Image (cartoon, rainbow, N blue to C red):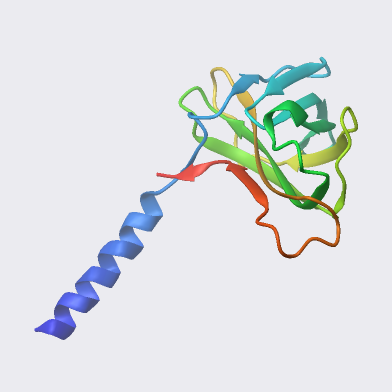
Amino acid sequence: MKKNIGVLFVLFVLMSAGCAHMDVSHLNRDHWVFESPSKISMEFMAFDYQVVPRKDSFGIRGTAFIQKDNVPEWARWIGELWIQGYLSDNDGVVLAQGMQVFSPEKLQAGVGVPFDFELKPEQIMSGPLFISFGYRMVLHRDKMDTISPPFMAIQGAVSQ
């Protein structure tokens, strides 16, 4: 009997996972507009970007800036930085996403990190489309600091 309950539980989890989708309705987003400079600001990062057509897909390229006024004053080193770009529908359901992981570097006010994502949706629904971003960052006092606790911030899509 216990074995059957375990099997049923595993089947339930697998079936539920099939219904899950990535959602960005909680993130700041902007309308999808081709080749028009746009900006999205979030709590710890801001993104200047353009949506560009490609042969069999779309691209989002631009520059990401850490909001230096919103992170600890002592933060001088980007130990880890991941940036995601999302294409979503009106409800925030992710239709396509791209991600880049960046090498550690010095954190400087006004100096951004260039990015370029490829977005290849399986299909494009009728209705409005939106661009949003996610990130994971870990900031340190300096390159060699392994003792002090880092500052960490994460915003991104959630599975629903």
Q: Is residue 23 left or right of residue 121?
A: left
Q: Is residue 58 left or right of residue 17?
A: right
Occupied quadrant, residue 130: top right
- Rendering coords of residue 11 (x, y %): 28, 68
Quadrant (top left/top right/bottom left/bottom right) for the C terminus: top left
* Placement of 28 over or under 114, stated as above or below: above
Q: Is residue 138 left or right of residue 156?
A: right
- Residue shown at 76% from the left, 38% from the top: 57
- Rendering coords of residue 154 (x, y %): 60, 44
In the depicted view, which residue is nearer to us: 83 or 112?
112
Most extreme residue toward the left is: 1
Q: How many marks?
A: 0
Quadrant (top left/top right/bottom left/bottom right) for the N terminus: bottom left
- Rendering coords of residue 135 (x, y %): 66, 42
In the depicted view, which residue is nearer to us: 117 or 157?
157
* Placement of 90 over or under 140, stated as above or below: above
- Rendering coords of residue 59 (x, y %): 79, 34
In the depicted view, which residue is nearer to us: 132 or 152?
152
Occupied quadrant, residue 87: top right
